[in-house]
Image (cartoon, grey):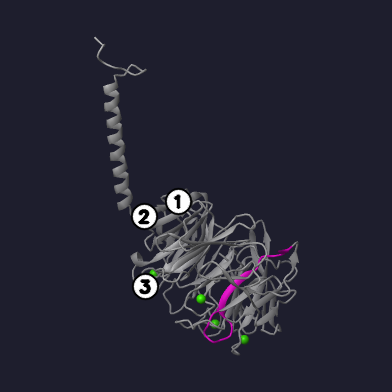
């Protein structure tokens, strides 16, 4: 007896089919509700990288520069020593005469293993204070961080220049370049050099050296090996380990890559992405977004090379949000958009074609606030150059100074820069530091041949005391 039962082509009774649809619909609705609830109670937010609804600006500055932007002329141009000078530059008052001095160096690279080969210290008039090393083997252009930093390592109020050359960490007296010590290190532990405070002394008196991506060695001021770690947490190292005293005990913890190390080198925690296969890459850059009184209160931003991710985590490694899908690289932290709660994150997206190179601005919630596309945005800084308390974005390649609307308001002029087919022949680097001694951070641009210094005449004094010269533990990442 089937006469009263309507069926569809598959011989399923239509009333059953309707019931099935209702059940499926109910099921879908309940799944959707569960999904919504899960999302709302989720401790982290996943943002889609395609979500490009930038709240404040989305601008482009490519090709010919806008000639209406103010041309900012250098206060000083220092020609680097032709034999010993190179594009890795740092600055400090080495000879304590009150004027900042420029340190630059060359390095030798083979198969991505590189070591420092020369260092030269010069006065602002270009005269040479001292030279160290062998000028016949290295290169002027950088490709990596160069293992050379300026630091008062022994705490006697005089700077040392410390570098890693093949098999040795070398300590030079800042004022004279005289070799004070050579400390044996593993032959490939020459990728970068970071001073930190592992021992709980009154100043950063320990040093980290590393090879490219696998091992970190920690030494104290006496040159004694404190510990070593290989593939921290099972992952490659970052380009530059970042010291942070997370628990306020006077000893730095070390963001070594995806792993945070205790000051004794043991693993404290490991960052675990909820969104990307982090094993595909390594940490390109780690920056403290906010310091805290306890690890919970710290906020740290990481960019993950290869895994194409940027994330905000707390000082226990808990993920607060992640934005994936792009090769986010170097991070600056500052207040970029007026009247939007700060600080903000400024980050470039690397590995883009020339002319399509973005910088993004994100807020503490990971919301995309702004995008600026330039020809090449890999190297950038933040600095208040107008004196209004808001930081401008400086993109080094064409010397652009950009305001909070993403418009170019100034161009740092670099006379003598070599061009080839309308393009600059080499990358330029930028550093921020007080070069005058007035407590206001200035702008430094470097090519393999020259250092250009621009006085920040409208800038405000920093709240904290600023050392003359560039920041400690400088990095290109
Ligand atoms: Ca000096
Ligand atoms: Ca010293
Ligand atoms: Ca600590
Ligand atoms: Ca400003």
Q: Which residue is mark 3?
A: 249
Residue lying at 43% horizontally and 62% vertically, measured from the top left: 261
Q: Is mark 1 within 8 Å of ligand 4?
A: no
| Element carrying mark 2 | loop
Dividing the picture into quarters, in which one does residue 455 lie? bottom right
Q: Which residue is mark 2?
A: 44
Range of residues picked out in magenta: 422-441
Q: Give the crowd class for mark 2: few <14, some 14-19, many >=20 residues within 10 Å.
A: some
Q: Give the crowd class for mark 3: few <14, some 14-19, many >=20 residues within 10 Å.
A: few
Q: Which residue is mark 1?
A: 48
Q: Check contact, mark 2 vs mark 3: CB within 8 A.
A: no
| Element carrying mark 3 | loop
Among numbered discs 2 and 3, the one appearing first in the sequence: 2
- In the rendered structure, the answer to whether residue 106 lies left or right of residue 275 reads right
Residue lying at 30% horizontally and 34% vertically, measured from the top left: 25
Among numbered discs 3 and 1, the one appearing first in the sequence: 1
Calculate the distance from the C-alpha at mark 3 to the C-alpha at mark 1.
Answer: 38 Å
Q: Which of labels 2 and 3 is toward the front? A: 2
Q: Would you say residue 456 is visible in this rendering?
A: yes
Q: Is mark 3 within 8 Å of ligand 3?
A: yes
């Amino acid at each position: 007896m089937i006469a009263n039962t309507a069926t569809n082509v598959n011989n399923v009774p239509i009333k059953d089919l309707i019931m099935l649809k209702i059940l499926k619909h109910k099921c879908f609705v309940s799944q959707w509700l569960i999904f919504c609830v899960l999302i709302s109670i989720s401790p982290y937010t996943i943002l889609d990288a395609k979500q490009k609804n930038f709240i404040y600006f989305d601008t482009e500055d490519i090709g010919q520069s806008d000639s209406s932007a103010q041309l900012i002329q250098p206060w000083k141009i220092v020609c680097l020593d032709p034999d010993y000078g190179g594009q890795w530059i740092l600055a400090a008052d080495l000879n304590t005469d009150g004027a900042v001095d420029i340190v630059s160096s060359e390095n030798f690279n083979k198969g991505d293993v590189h070591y420092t080969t020369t260092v030269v210290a010069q006065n602002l008039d270009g005269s040479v204070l001292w030279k160290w090393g062998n000028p016949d083997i290295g290169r002027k252009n950088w490709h990596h961080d160069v293992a050379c930093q300026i630091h008062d390592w022994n705490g006697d109020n005089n700077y040392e220049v410390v570098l890693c050359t093949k098999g040795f960490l070398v300590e030079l007296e800042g004022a004279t370049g005289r070799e004070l010590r050579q400390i044996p290190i593993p032959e490939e532990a020459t990728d970068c050099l970071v001073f930190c405070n592992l021992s709980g002394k009154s100043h950063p008196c320990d040093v980290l050296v590393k090879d490219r991506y696998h091992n970190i060695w920690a030494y104290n001021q006496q040159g004694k090996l404190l510990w070593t770690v290989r593939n921290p947490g099972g992952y490659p190292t970052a380009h530059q380990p970042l010291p942070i005293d997370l628990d306020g005990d006077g000893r730095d913890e070390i963001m070594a890559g995806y792993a945070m190390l205790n000051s004794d080198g043991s693993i404290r925690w490991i960052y675990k992405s909820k969104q990307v296969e982090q094993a595909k890459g390594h940490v390109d850059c780690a920056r403290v977004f906010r310091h805290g009184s306890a690890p919970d209160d710290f906020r740290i931003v990481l960019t993950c090379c290869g895994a194409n991710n940027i994330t905000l985590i707390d000082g226990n490694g808990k993920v607060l949000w992640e934005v994936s899908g792009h090769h986010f690289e170097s991070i600056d932290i500052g207040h970029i958009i007026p009247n939007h709660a700060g600080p903000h994150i400024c980050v470039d997206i690397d590995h883009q074609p020339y002319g399509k190179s973005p910088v993004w601005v994100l807020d503490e919630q990971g919301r995309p606030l702004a995008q600026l596309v330039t020809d090449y945005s890999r190297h950038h800084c933040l600095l208040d150059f107008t004196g209004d308390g808001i930081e401008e974005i400086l993109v080094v390649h064409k010397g652009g100074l950009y305001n909070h609307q993403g418009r170019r308001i100034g161009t740092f002029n670099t006379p003598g820069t070599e061009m080839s087919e309308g393009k600059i022949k080499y990358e330029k680097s930028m550093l921020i530091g007080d070069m005058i001694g007035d407590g206001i951070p200035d702008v430094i641009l470097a090519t393999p041949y020259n250092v250009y210094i621009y006085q920040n005449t409208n800038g405000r004094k920093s709240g904290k005391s600023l050392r003359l010269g560039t920041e400690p533990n400088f990095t290109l990442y």
